[in-house]
Amino acid sequence: MLEWMMNWCVSNRAHSWLLLHAAVVEKNGCGIILPAPPGSGKSTLCAALVCRGWRLLSDELTLVRHADGILAPLPRPVSLKNASIDVIRAFAPDAVFGPLAYGTAKGTVGHLRAPKNSIQRANEYAAPLAIVFPRWEAGAATVLTPLPKARSFMRVADNAFNYMLLGEHGFQTLGKLTENCDGYEFVYSRLDEAMLTFDAMVGEAA
Amino acid sequence: MMTSLLSVLREPAAVRGLSPGVWDLLLRQAASADVLATLGLLLQDGGLFDAVPAAPRAHLEWACTAGVSHARGARHEVDMIAAALQELSVPLILLKGGAYAMAGLDAGRGRLFSDIDILVPKERLHEVEAALMLHGWASTQHDEYDQRYYREWMRLAGVDGRAVPARPAAAIAGHRCAPGRCRQCLLVYWRQLVAHATNIAVLPSL
């Protein structure tokens, strides 16, 4: 509830940013935005990435600055639900979780501690490189498909909290963002393979 | 003397030199009274933003953005209403919030309202309601009890099934009749209103 209220305060007020419902991580100075509706595996993927050395900017809110399209971090614990909790525990045995909340409206909810390094660098903004729309599918092969700019634009707009409210300003900021970032659709089921895909995007060989 | 929201609204220059604690209270009072955007635009118009510390200033700027967005949305809505009424040759008369905003009056700066009230000749009410319905508006007051309340006691049904509180009989001094029920009063009041209404020449569809 507290987490929801904190998100509400940002997503309903902080209009000096274009606010996206998206996780956002960074490595080698490259920010990757992961917009997705609930249930698409966005937080799980984000948790896995930050357990493997990516910097957590946020698992829920991406703040895009109007003037230059740069991303502001908002690092907080990553909220994971139900089966995702055990998936991440198995994937990263060192991961630290807070006490689990059972029987919430969303089932069991656990919070993964944000990496210390991400918290220390909370004031360090990141330049966006790519927008990746993740979708977890049981047993699916790992597939990264490029998206046309216009399609990325519309899909990011669908995942924005204040796109309509910002009017022309929002259109300009989102236009610049999609212009500067490659857009992809990403289907996955195995986190290890997903890590390789993301590392390759920022120029890291396996 | 404690600086209150009211004193700042009356005398915006009073914001100079306020302490962070007073700003905290002022912002919460303004948000709670739905006048944060009004306050922000008042300070912006008065060139007083430079006198506001960065943190409260950010809140005020966000509220201004939201206020401007609200005005844009209201303008669009009024334009749609005008288009619906145009084919009936019923003049569009706005009351209250929508009127202040569209007439560009100071009282409308940053003002938030949840409905747009219009005044139409009583004998054309059914035509107007039908025209609005054909243009996509739906009544939110389906309940017969609510309908009777609005039509019997509020006299004039507004857009979206909401009511315009009107006291037409009060317009003619010394004339005693049942409030809102006297046809003569309504006609006189109607003519007075049309004669004194502020013209809005900026609507594209008018």
Image: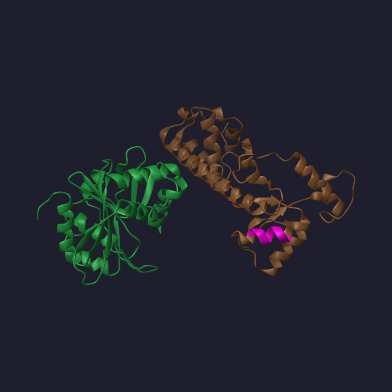
Chain colours: A green, B brown
- Considering the whole magenta stretch, tell me its main secondary structure: helix
Drawn side of residue B136 relative to residue A8, left or right: right
Image quadrant occupied by the C terminus of chain A: bottom left
Q: Residue A48: percent from the left, percent from the top?
A: 21, 59
Which residue is at a point 85% across and 54% down the rendered structure image?
B183
Image quadrant occupied by the N terminus of chain A: bottom left
Drawn side of residue A132 relative to residue B16, left or right: left
Which residue is at a point 57% across and 45% down the rendered structure image?
B75
Occupied quadrant, residue B131: bottom right
Magenta segment includes A79: no
Q: Residue B100: percent from the left, percent from the top?
A: 64, 41
Occupied quadrant, residue B59: top left
Residue range highlighted in magenta = B126-132
Q: Residue A186: percent from the left, percent from the top?
A: 24, 60
Q: Please state the total of marks drawn on the protein image.
A: 0
Would residue A53 be visible to someone looking at this image? no
Q: Nearer the viewer, residue B140 or B196?
A: B196
